[in-house]
Image (cartoon, rainbow, N blue to C red):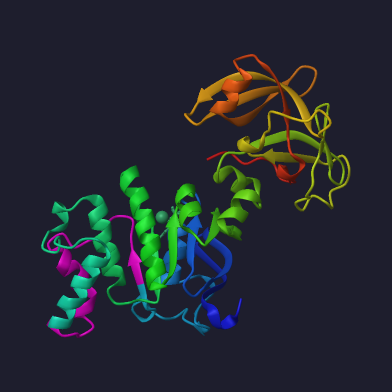
Amino acid sequence: MNAHDIYLRLASVSKTFGRFMALENVSFQAQRGEFLCVLGPSGCGKTTLLRVVAGLEKQTRGDVFIEGRNVSSLPVSKRNVGIVFQSYALFPNLTARQNIAYGLKSQGQSRQAIQRRVGELLELVGLQGMGRKHPAKLSGGQQQRVALARAIAVSPDLLLLDEPLSALDAKVRVMLRGEIRQLQQRLGITTIMVTHDQEEALTMADRILVIDRGRLVQDGTPRQVYDKPATPFVAGFIGAMNFIADARKIENGVYDIGETRLRVSAENGTGRLPAGSRVTIAIRPEDVMLRHDPSAPNLLETRVAAMEYRGSLFRIDLKRRASMENEATITADVPSETVRRLGITLNSTLPVHLPVDRLRVYEMKIPATN
Ligand SMILES: Nc1ncnc2c1ncn2[C@@H]1O[C@H](COP(=O)(O)OP(=O)(O)O)[C@@H](O)[C@H]1O
Ligand SMILES: [Mg+2]
């Protein structure tokens, strides 16, 4: 990445509230025009991070750079940002037009220029003809469109969105996702959106920053974060994941779970662990394969313990023998067509295959699931 193309950079930013560390040593950069999603559960520090970037909150340590310039001591008004908050935060006594015009007035533009600009913005967010309505007369989705128009009215170079869709109905949310992304691309505006919704992050982001208790634990494209989650926390937070906790290292690339030997194609920081170490092996439900070649590695004999119909697929809980006394569960997502074709029912015996390249090995214990 060319240093010239970096719009925003955070260097070792920490933020404490009293003794509580809300952000710990967070560093990342955003390229000009990039759409970043900050993803993590409630309370992990997402809003704090956005407020530090905006200049609404001053970090305790570290620095914020915009276009290479240290803006750490600049107030929000000097950072050229547009912000949309989770709650609509529109002025209830002003019309949509007046809300959008709010920031433009303080720029000292002529009345005519403001009217023209507001008209453009209303059209841009698909609210033509709604300008005279007050927020109370608009739906949630329409209110967030007004908030978005208001945020981009002053043509900021950085757009900050704090869970802008979380208060909306599922259908409106999905529609607005696409609209926001298109608008962002059309304007080419560098954007950071905070969300706790993994699907939102996966569908919208160029890059996802995953936050776990104030720490940035992964920074990658949606595919990288989904396919190669850096920690068990990331693996469990984004998508569904099986964690096989009773695994033991034999040698690099070879692990035992109970009486079954597994081959794994990629180590994940576990290459340096000595033989005998306890590890957790993870695999996504959709990667658990049913039909196999009997000579393939990583075969398990399992029994169907539960089946949940989900339309296009069944989520199936499979029991495997973990030790002489114990059974452990692995969940598999199986296309409904396969279930029908193979006649899989409760208590069916099912040999499954865990592809060597779909297994992840973690040194750490499994996380408490969200
Ligand atoms: N002004 C504040 N004073 C004290 N604690 C705060 C303050 N703002 C946030 N926190 C704490 O910091 C943590 C992160 O908060 P926040 O950034 O709002 O999380 P998120 O947006 O991910 O839900 C929470 O535990 C919250 O209680
Ligand atoms: Mg928040």
Left or right, 312 with respect to 132, comes to right
Q: Which residues are magenta?
A: 82-111
Residue at 20% x, 61% y: name it: 127
Q: With respect to residue 248, does 51 lie above or below?
A: below
Q: Give the quadrant of residue 256.
A: top right
Q: Give the quadrant of residue 156.
A: bottom left
- From the top left corner, tell me how far across and down residue 204 is, in percent: 46, 57
Residue at 49% x, 70% y: name it: 59
- From the top left corner, tell me how far across and down residue 114 is, in percent: 18, 79
* Whether residue 202 can be seen here: yes
Asked if the stretch drawn in magenta spans residue 100, the answer is: yes
Question: Residue 100 or 126: which is nearer the viewer?
Answer: 126
Left or right, 77 with respect to 283, comes to left
Left or right, 198 with respect to 321, comes to left
- From the top left corner, tell me how far across and down residue 203 is, in percent: 47, 53
Residue at 84% x, 31% y: name it: 295
